[in-house]
Structures are given as structure tokens and as C-alpha cells.
Image (cartoon, rainbow, N blue to C red):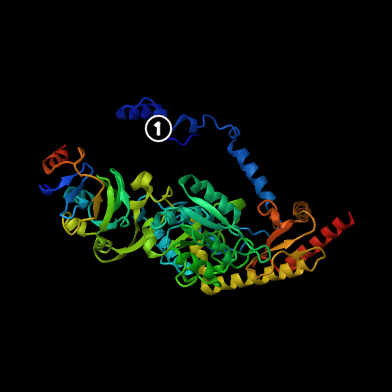
Amino acid sequence: MSKIPAELKYARTHEWLRPEDDGSVTLGISDHAQEALGDLVFVEIPEVGRSVTPGEACAVVESVKAASDVYSPIAGEVTAVNEALASQPELLNSDPYGEGWIMKIRPASGIETPELLDAKAYAETLED
Amino acid sequence: MPFIPHTEDDIREMLGVIGVDSIEQLFDEIPSGLKIEALSGVPPALSEMEIQRLMRERAARDEGHLNFIGAGAYEHHIPAAVWEVTTRGEFYSAYTPYQAEASQGTLQLIYEYQSMMAALTGMDVSNASLYDGASAMAEAALMAVRANRASNSGRILVPATVNPAYRRVAHSIAGGQGLEFETVPYCREAGVTLPEALRAWDDADVTALVIQQPNFFGGYEDVAAMTDWARAKGALVIAVVNPISLALLEAPGTWGENGADIACGEGQPLGVPLSSGGPYFGFLACRQALVRQMPGRIVGRTVDLDGRSGFALTLQAREQHIRRSKATSNICTNQGLMVTAATIYMSLLGAEGLARVAAACVANTAELVGRLGSIQGVRRTFSGPYFHESVLSFDHPVAPLLEALAERGILGGYDLSRDYPELGHALLLCATETRTTTDIETYFQALDDVLRHARVA
């Protein structure tokens, strides 16, 4: 059973979001996603300052068997990216909710959208 | 005999499993306006006997001429061993085999090929090859747009001195994908791009600059100045190069302060016969930092569980069969057989042999240009130095001249009037190491004769 921290929000496409104190939102991929992808060998991160729209592909995570897009569930501007992933993509495997974060986004408006799921609802999508 | 193994029953059964009525239904997502109902330009099928005869007759027309045409495809001597080895059953495949790792010999050969091309171009990594030089340049442009994320324009600067066929193909392949190809004018006197011409884009967002060296006219571009200009403004540099020339000229990886980012070109000069235009192969090499945006496949060297070295396809996650429509390219294979020939060719010649071929080409073309230029009414079009091709100007149209020469068994060169009408009656010609002093003298006599008749008439 993969880990699904209760305090995070989730997208059906397996990204997680964590609202930070400074108003920004941290984005990563879920434990389930990293497990399904297998050993990650490369993470393509966006430029800081790029604006993203809901559902837009903003990063690529590449494992030995697949390269998958990471979608932003919200609109906003990328304010920080996890540079450590360039040399240590395996952080996504070892610590998907911590050291393996991908980017921080300053939301254009609130992050409460019906598309975002809480931990319980996300866990249910994985059972289907 | 149709080479389709499925019977009507097989097909019906398979369609039934996925709940579809007909094969056509699988293509429903393609708008009907884009579908071609009938291939009106294709004649009825010929029998094996008829097609063999037709091909023999056509092949016979190519024989017995003295060839002085270059313009992107070059007649070089190919040692007999090259195709003797290439056509052995173990190598005889057009592509990387399926279950590639089961064919370690093929993978090792591709790995050796990649290593040689990386060394020749001065780049970090080469792919396993592409279809031809023109499509390699188009792929390089698409790759540059993906890789240069600081640029949003999709603007690719292409000097007018880049092979016109390459420019047309790049436009066909990439023009519909939001790329803007803009032409950099050339100097009419020198036949090269003046670095000053790039100043017009000083304030523009440029994604990449293409530089062909030697250029289509055979002249030498100021690659250092052009590369430095591009890199200073954050544009990537795409080098289009002739692999034979790299035995003598500076490798793209060392152009200017920091080198080019991508090197590509036509691999045909490396052991592939002209064959009425193909198959040839394209090569593409780049810096390590760009490798994830590189199209095509790459063979890597690794070790197995027991620590023994072996070869494997790598970076496949970016390829079409896995990443579908988001792949780096629609190309998901390579020109395996041509690459086999090229690898054997390069290993037989070695660095020194390749340099001797290049030097012989340069000397023969200089001899040809000097000899023909001594004829009344024939003069060099451009002033600068050149590699193994150059341009001559005439007082009369070139097309009838070439016809008269062809009647005397000479393919006299490439008529530039269609692609470069501003040059007037201009002819691009080439003498590789296969042309002897006697051949050049034969051309001289024939041309002198033809022009003498033209003057009388």
C-alpha cells in the first residue's frame, strides 16, 4: 500500500499539492506514481517564472521504462524548482513527499478546485 | 502475392474482440479531408519480370558517365571489403533489430559508429543515425526548439548558403510545427555568409542558428564568429557538416569559444554508393546536456549482472513506441545497413585515410576549377577559398551546356539557376578523389569544344 499523507491535496493524474505558509504551493508526484514508474533516471523541470494553467504539462519524469508528463492542477507561476533532481532524480523514488518535491507555484487564485482530491478520495481512485 | 498473414476471418475476429466493425473505423479520428481515397498517381502493378527489366534499363542509364556533380551527394571510392562485409547475413538488416539486445554484434557496431561520429564531430554523443542529411537538419531544428527553453520564438536562422534541398525539407517537416525559418543573406562576391548579416537579428529572440560548413557553394563560413554571435545571445548552433571534410576542418564541437550544440549532416560520403539518390543516412550528434531532446535511438555500453560488458538500447523512454505522440521524434529506428557500411568504411580508412581522401578531393577540385576557368567565357563566381566544390559562371544558360556534355558522357555539375537565379548562369561542380587528371582533361576538352560551337552558333 502506498503512502498518502492526509494533509495533502491530490490530482487524479497523481500529483500532490501542499499549501505553504508563504502562499505558494509545492507540487510533487505521489508515492503511488513513483512506484508505478519505477527507478527514475531523469526529471525535466520547468524554468522559474513560467506560468502554468490547470492541466498543463509542466515537467517530465522519466524512468527506465517510460517518460511521463507531470500536470499542474492549478493556474499560477513557477517560483522555485528542485534543482537537486538534476543530479539525483532518485529522490522522487526515495522521498516523493519530501526531498523529491518538483516545484513551487504561486497560485493565480485559490487552490480549492473540484478536481483536487483529499487523501481519502485519492486513495479511493487507486482502488479502482 | 500479398504479404499480409491475416485471413479475413482473423481480421473479423480481432475486430470483434475490440468491438469495432471495420479496419477503417480505427482511423476515424483522422479528418476525412486529410484522407486520400485513391492513389491516382500510382500506375498498375508490374510483374516481377517486368519490374526487373524496368529497373535494369534505368540502372543502365546511370552507367558510363564521368561524374562531376556534388551538391550534397558525392562519388567516393568504396573499398570492396565495405559491402562484402556489410551484406553478410549477420548484418543484412535495414534497421535496428527488434529485441535489439539479442543482437549484440549489431549493437556493438552501432556503438562503434556512434563513437566514431562523436569523435569526428567533436561532440559528446551521437545517435544511431537518421534517414538522411536533410531530415537530420529538420530534426536538429525541432530538437533545438525543445532544448532552448529560454527562447519562445521557434525562430531558426538558416543562411541561404545551406543546401536548398535541406531548407525545403526542413520547412516541410518542421514548418507546420510552429518553427519559423528565416533566411540569412549571403555575400554575392565571396559566396559565404558575412557575420555582419546576423546583426539584423541582434535584438530578436533566436532559437537556433544553422551553419553549413563547407557551405553549399563549397566555401568556408566564418564558423567561429557566427557560433560566438549565436551563443552570446542564447541561441543554439546547429552545424551541418560533410563527414569527409571533418578529417581536415575544425570539428563543430570546437567552433568559436564554446563550440556548436548540435552537429548533423549527410553520411552518404562514408561508403554509401550514389544509387540514384538513396538510401543514404543522416547523422546527428550533440552535447551531453541536450541528449534527452535528441531524436532517434542510442546504443549504450553497460555491464550485465555478472559484470560482463554488453550493449543495450538506451533512452528508449523518449521514443515513439513508448512515448507515443509526445516522443522526441517520429523516428524510432535507424539506417542500420548504411551505418554498417559507414562504420566499416571509417574503420578501414582510419583518421589518416579519411584525411587523405579529403585532401585528394580538395586538390582535384582545385585542378578542375583552374583548368576549366582557363577557357574563354568561364570564370569563378566567388572569390574565396573552397573545399571540394566550387561555382563557375558562364555567359550562356547552363542547362543546354549540361545536355551537350551529357551527350559526351560527362555529368558536368549542378545547375544553380533554379535555386539561385541571382547568380545568373552558374554551375556548381565537384571532383572527388575518384577523378583523375585524365578525367579533368576530358572534361576540359569537351567543355572547350561545346563552348566553341556555342560561340560559332
**Quarter of the rendering containing residue B51:** top right
Q: In this view, which residue lies farthest toward the top?
A: B21
Question: In the rendered view, does B247 fall on the left or right side of A12?
Answer: right
Q: How many marks?
A: 1
Residue A13 place in picture, x, y as percent: 23, 43
Q: In this view, which residue lies farthest toward the right?
A: B456
Question: In the rendered view, does B56 fall on the left or right side of B240?
Answer: right
Q: Quadrant of the C terminus of chain B?
A: bottom right
Front residue (pair B54, B412): B412
**Label 1 sits on what residue type?**
Glu
Question: In the rendered view, does A72 fall on the left or right side of B443?
Answer: left
Q: Residue at x 49, y 69 (%)?
A: B228
Question: In the rendered view, does B380 fall on the left or right side of B347?
Answer: right
Front residue (pair A22, B116): A22
Residue B412 visible to the viewer: no
Residue B400 place in picture, x, y as percent: 78, 51
Q: Residues within 10 Å of mark 1 (few under 14, many from 20)?
A: few
**Residue that numbered label 1 is attached to:** B29
Q: What SS does tag 1 mark?
A: loop
Q: Residue at x 16, y 45 (%)?
A: A9
Residue B236 place in picture, x, y as percent: 45, 61
Residue B317 place in picture, x, y as percent: 32, 52
Residue B24 visible to the viewer: yes
Q: In this view, which residue lies farthest toward the bottom?
A: B352
Q: Residue at x 34, y 28 (%)?
A: B15
Chain letter of the residue beneath label 1 in the structure image = B
**Quarter of the rendering containing residue B124:** bottom left
